[in-house]
Amino acid sequence: MSKLLIANSPVLTFLKTLHSCSTRRFSVGAASLSSVKGRSCLTLKDFSSDEIKRILWVSADLKHRIKHEKEYLPLLQGKSIAMIFEKRSTRTRMSTETGFALLGGHPCFLTTQDIHMGVNENYKDSARVLSGLCDIILARVYSHSTLEELDKEASIPIINGLSDRYHPIQILADFLTVQEHYGSLSGLTVSWIGKGNMVSHSFLMAAAKLGVHMKIATPKGYEPEKSVIEEAQRLSKQHGTQFVLTSDPMEAACDSNVLVTDTWVDFEKEEEEDKKKRLKDFEGFQITMQTGSVAKPDWIFLHCLPRKMEEVDDQVFYSSRSLIFPEAANRKWTIMGLMVSLLTDYDPKIPMIKF
């Protein structure tokens, strides 16, 4: 009788509740970081501040346990991923394929030459077929609408491996790299100097949620999409961060912690006149040590690669300020963290990283 009374006592009920909360939320007193299991990741616009932090925390945890502690963690054993690539890739393919295998899963690399999707089978049917054959899909596509259609029809998570609108998995790697370097993210300033594109769009969908100020410098006519700018302004106001749009690279670089650019030239596909116009439009946008001279004394440089000389010179690209290769390596740990977060109930074992 006494045991029954103790088992049903308010004190024990409270202790059980506290233990349950600490198990779900990773530690008592830590930020309440929600699970993202079962979700798709088409854009970080769809993820809250806590959800992005959780993915980064899981990524840092996996990196520590597997790379540094040499643990074997077959968290995805028995699972498979369909990797659909309409566009070629080095980092996205290698990070996803090796990362999924390292976690015990089976990656299947598929190009448009390997499957019927989009050729003589529509996306609706392909999504439903693949949902019965694998556990998750990563798709690197030309049009973001392709991802939206796959996500609408699939019953498994879809990951955006790059589209014409967003590149969320690149930004997760970028923010993990910055966090590792500075020890935290909140209060830092990231300056994007180049062309408004899927990478800059993804920065704008996540930066404010992590307490990061954003400056965007583009030539006139090369700005991010209007709807993305409007959402970035709303997020900046909501989270109390600064958001600056300018056409002056030096204004953007001023007092910045992180200088970032991406490919804004595609000379292989451009006519000679288009090439000349592009170079003229982007005159002064090459990141050099002079650009960095107005940034914070401890500024760093990022680039998602591949890079062309017109975007950043060798002096910056191969300098100690450049974290491009750790950034590229972190693509593996963050895609692993994302896939584990979407497919499992995994709880990080290391203390929560500082944001």
Image (tube, rainbow, N blue to C red):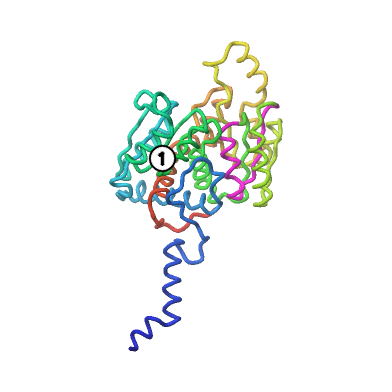
For this orientation, the residue located farthest to the left is 78
Look at label 1 and name its amino acid. Answer: Lys
Percent position (x, y) of residue 162?
Answer: 49, 33
Query: Was residue 218 drawn as part of the magenta stretch in this picture?
Result: yes
Q: Front-most of 127 and 189?
A: 127
Q: Is residue 348 left or right of residue 77?
A: right
107 or 265, which lies in front?
107
As for residue 166 lying within the magenta part, the answer is no
Question: Which residue corresponds to mark 1?
Answer: 332
Range shown magenta: 197-220
Q: Which quadrant is home to the N terminus?
A: bottom left
Give the camera-side residue of 67 and 292: 67
In the rendering, at what x and y percent does residue 297 appear?
63, 41
User: In the visual, does 249 lie left or right of 168?
Assistant: right
The local secondary structure at tag 1 comes to: helix
Image check: 183 left or right of 333?
Answer: right
Residue 332, percent from left and from top: 41, 40
Query: What residue occupies the far top of the structure in this picture?
Result: 272
Give the residue at x 40% y 34%.
125
When the figure is inspected, residue 79 is found, relative to residue 165, above or below; the finding is below
